[in-house]
Amino acid sequence: MFFRLMYHVVLPIYVVFVIFSSITLDKSQNNFLMILLGSIFITSIYLERVYPRSFIYIAAIEILSLLLFHFTSQLNWCFSIYIILLSKFLFQIKGVLKGIFLGFVLIAFYTVIRISYTPINAYSLLAVVSDFLTSLAVVLIIQYIIETERAKNLLEEEKKREELRYQEEKMKLLGEMAGGLAHEIRNPLTIIQGFLKHSKEYNYNIKPWYDLIISEVSRMNKLTVEFLQFSKPNVSLYQTFAIHECLKRVISLTESKARSSGHQIIYTDSNPDLFLPMDFDKMVQVFVNLINNAIQSMVKDGDITIRLFKVENKAVIEISDMGVGIEEANLEKIFSPFYTTKSDGTGLGLSICQKIIFKIMEERLR
């Protein structure tokens, strides 16, 4: 918006100002030709917006009409027009060296024309050096702006791709958890259905079992709420949360799958008052990933132990299982994207976990 305002509003106004000044100061030898060339230059500026594919031809018209306009106006104030035009070109070409070359060419043209109507003396020669240094500064400043903007855009794109990978991995986790959740809900539903069927067909008194039925319904509701909460897309948000609450959410999400696979999750919390600045949903995703890996690694029924404790001023979360473990030769590869030993694995789980942890560490260091 800023640059469009400069090219399409400020630049034409400045050309009109130069025309007015040249006529007022009686500098131009041919006012009609100067006005005509100024009009051609302004028109070419707007034509570039209408015909963007004809950039080379229109740029040639802009430069030629500016040179002739400068010559007919015989005012050094045209230097500002050269600089504005140079800045416009710099945003359309790539490379610092190309920008420096273009800047030197334009200023060389400006200098030749300026010398044609001004006396050559020490001031004039020093002005030439000043003009070239100014053009060099403009080139470097604009190249810095371009590179900064490009780096910012690349960072935004990488952030979007990373967020997409998080969501893809989350969907994979949801698919894995859905089977365990269905099994966990099916059993109490079968029991409740049996009670209701007996009550209807045989007038069976189920009043003594009300508390059990209500308890099972509440547990199913809690499971579905946790599952839906985890499945929602989340905006990255770092706040201070109790680690205990995060682990409780993780256990709610993974306990059904662990139980249906014949395993048990054992959680020991020796210090519930431990807090950490984190993205809560992404931290949950880290631990769900780790526990799912633990479940898949255990061939026989076993325990997954989660411990939360404090060592000096640090919180320690320890997760252990009774699985086959990882071969020492593969330990260096486990965090590499797309590395997996599972036939249906994506190889992104641990890589994403590592990135989330690194991000939390960065936030703590700020």
Image (tube, grey):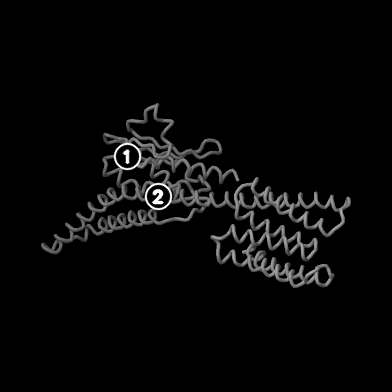
Residue at position x 22%, y 56% in the image: 189
- Between 178 and 80, the residue placed more toward the observer is 80
The image shows residue 181 at horizontal and vertical percentages of 29, 51
Q: Amino acid at mark 2?
A: Arg
Residue reaching furthest top? 328
> How many C-alpha atoms fall within 10 Å of the one at disc 2: few (<14), some, or many (≥20)?
many
Query: Relative to 111, is 44 on the left or the right?
Result: left
Query: Which residue, given by chain and number where applicable, does mark 1 sit on?
Result: 295
Using the image, determine if residue 159 lies above or below residue 118.
above
Query: Which residue, given by chain and number where applicable, does mark 2 sit on?
Result: 249
Q: Amino acid at mark 1?
A: Ile
* CA gap, disc 1 and disc 2: 17 Å
Residue at position x 43%, y 51% in the image: 164
- Between 315 and 134, the residue placed more toward the observer is 134
Labelled pair 1, 2 in contact (Cβ < 8 Å): no
> How many C-alpha atoms fall within 10 Å of the one at disc 1: few (<14), some, or many (≥20)?
many
Nearer the camera: disc 1 or disc 2: 1
Using the image, determine if residue 24 lies above or below residue 326.
below
Quadrant where the image shows the N terminus: bottom right
Is disc 2 placed on a helix, strand or loop? helix
The image shows residue 80 at horizontal and vertical percentages of 74, 60
The image shows residue 345 at horizontal and vertical percentages of 33, 41
Using the image, determine if residue 329 lies above or below residue 138.
above
Query: Relative to 4, is 358 on the left or the right?
Result: left
Query: Relative to 65, is 286 on the left or the right?
Result: left
Is disc 1 placed on a helix, strand or loop? helix
Residue at position x 33%, y 56% in the image: 224
Query: Relative to 294, is 360 on the left or the right?
Result: right
